[in-house]
Image: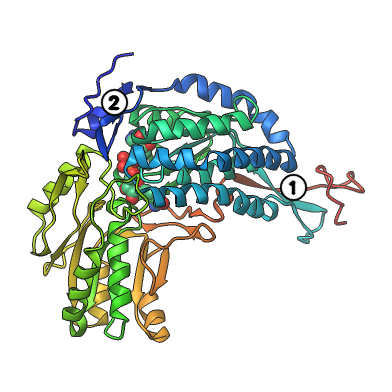
Amino acid sequence: METIRNPEQTSMLEFEKSAAWKNLSPGDLSFSFPQSIAGDVESAVANASAVMAGWARTSLAERIERLREAQRAIAAAKEELSHGIALETGKPITEAQGEVGAVIAKIDLTIEDAGSHLAERTGLGGPHPSLVRQAPRGPAVVIGPFNFPLHLGHGANVAHLLAGNPVIYKPSPLAANVAAKYGRIMETAFPGGVFQLVQGGGVEGSALCLDPRIRAICFTGSVPVGRELARKLAGDFSKDLALELGGGNALIVCADADLDEAARAAAEGACLTAGQRCNATSRVIVERSVAAGFEKKFLEALAVFEPGDPLLAATKLGPLVSAAAVARYERLLGEMPGDWLLRGRTEPIVAGKRGYWVRPAVIHREDGRADDAECFVPIVSYFIAEDLAHAVRLHSTTPFGLTASVFTRSEETFRRLGAELEVGNLYANLPTTFSPSTLPFGGWRDSGNSRPGGRGFIRYTTREQAVQWKGFFSKTSPNGTPDPA
Ligand code: NAD
């Protein structure tokens, strides 16, 4: 296959169309990973279809045992996987370790969810004995983003596998090498064809999603790609399409807030993963009476986020993932309307290494205009609200609805404001990035299509079937459940 990717490329489009590529480490551009090659979509889908019936027939106990085997292997490889995430995506190593920890814990949480979700329901009344069962949907495709290259795809992978669906995981091409390590562990733990990893970009992702043999898709990525998939699949009722998309998340600082805590949370929300999180704080909305005091504390809190080597435990701000991301950061610095409270800049060399570092920036905006595009770099739009009603109006100027956080000492204010914020994840006095795996995590409006990922994703891996019978199955149901009659 032809290698057409230029490592210094800035066009994601060109990259997404390439069949082979080499990633550079964003925190050390002299380090280049081995070449990755796009996978064979047709044979992966054929394999998944071939093993579908057999995997669906396995008991939940057997599926759990396979996952436990994968869990033990992931735990044994925790440091290698964390190092791989940090090296390939630029995410600081402590964050990468947190991601792998979440991957391991996700298996326990999903097994717990599977027990209740997959159990047959009986005793529902009606003239005949009956039950409701959850049937596997069919072969599933999971598409992952670069910023959580293992954790986000893994959550859907595990849920589908427990439900009896073979899975094809297509990770982000920007994290192909660490994803390959994860893929080898998962493939080894399951019978051939039950879990497969297919490398590639948009071409492979699109071909996988549109294949008629695929019955469930979990796509985590940007709004434009999610929208394109939803449009192309609009008439296909045989597929479930779960969309986990971008955000334009706001942290709202009320007049009675603890300003120190709010400032620290806003800085953390803006800078974790260098702003490349769906739940990053890209907007801060502050009530005018405390704006001056908050502003000073916010800029002080941001000063803690010094660019550093992502492989060092002390680093809080790693580089952006690619030259394309740096180019977008520079474009936003040039184009965003308003007064810069903190001027950002790129840092091409940090600790003697060439990389894609940028510094946080804050812009005071008076326009109140909607940002239709996700920010996804550490630039914060700072708005001053005359009162809480104005804060709500400012909040709703983006099309997104992922996370929002309200800083206030008053539960009543939180409840009142919260009722008006159209987001899938609502927090009080916590960073917008505080999204634990123990809860569902889904976006409203442009941020998703009401298929919450995180906890409970298993709901979207099955099809519900109502069964009733007359005249036979006197003692047990077709599946062995005691006959409710
Ligand atoms: P992206 O949309 O560029 O790519 C995501 C994945 O989709 C990649 O694997 C890519 O190869 C694949 N892809 C590209 N074109 C495709 C197509 N036409 N059909 C199918 N697949 C295709 O996103 P990214 O830059 O990798 O990740 C960042 C985005 O993900 C941000 O928008 C972020 O907000 C979002 N995200 C959302 C959540 C959430 O839970 N809501 C979590 C993390 C990231």
Q: Nearer the viewer, residue 220 or 227?
A: 220
Q: Nearer the viewer, residue 195 or 416?
A: 195
395 relative to 292, above or below: above
Image disc number at residue 302? none
Label 2 with label 1: CB-CB less than 8 Å: no
Q: Residues within 10 Å of mark 2 (few under 14, many from 20)?
A: some
Residue 356 vs residue 174: left or right?
A: left
The image quadrant of residue 39 is top left
Q: Quadrant of ligand 1?
A: top left
The image quadrant of residue 352 is top left
Residue 370 vs residue 257: left or right?
A: left
Q: Amino acid at mark 2?
A: Lys
Q: Amino acid at mark 1?
A: Val
Q: CA distance from mark 2 to mark 1?
A: 46 Å
Report the quarter where the N terminus lies.
Answer: top left
Report the quarter where the C terminus lies.
Answer: bottom right
Element at label 1: strand
Element at label 2: helix
Q: Residue at coordinates 31% horizontally, 24% vertically from top-left?
A: 21
Q: Residue at coordinates 72% horizontally, 43% vertically from top-left?
A: 60
The earlier-in-sequence mark between 2 and 1 is 2
Name the spot of residue 269 as percent of width and height, x first: 32, 62
Residue 136 shows in this picture: no
Circle 2 residue: 17
Single out the residue that lies furthest toward the right: 475
Residue 459 vs residue 127: left or right?
A: left
Circle 1 residue: 467
Q: Residue at coordinates 54% horizontally, 41% vertically from top-left?
A: 157
Name the spot of residue 379 as percent of width and height, x first: 20, 57
Q: Residue at coordinates 48% horizontally, 55% vertically from top-left?
A: 452
Q: Nearer the viewer, residue 202 or 4?
A: 4
187 relative to 330, above or below: above
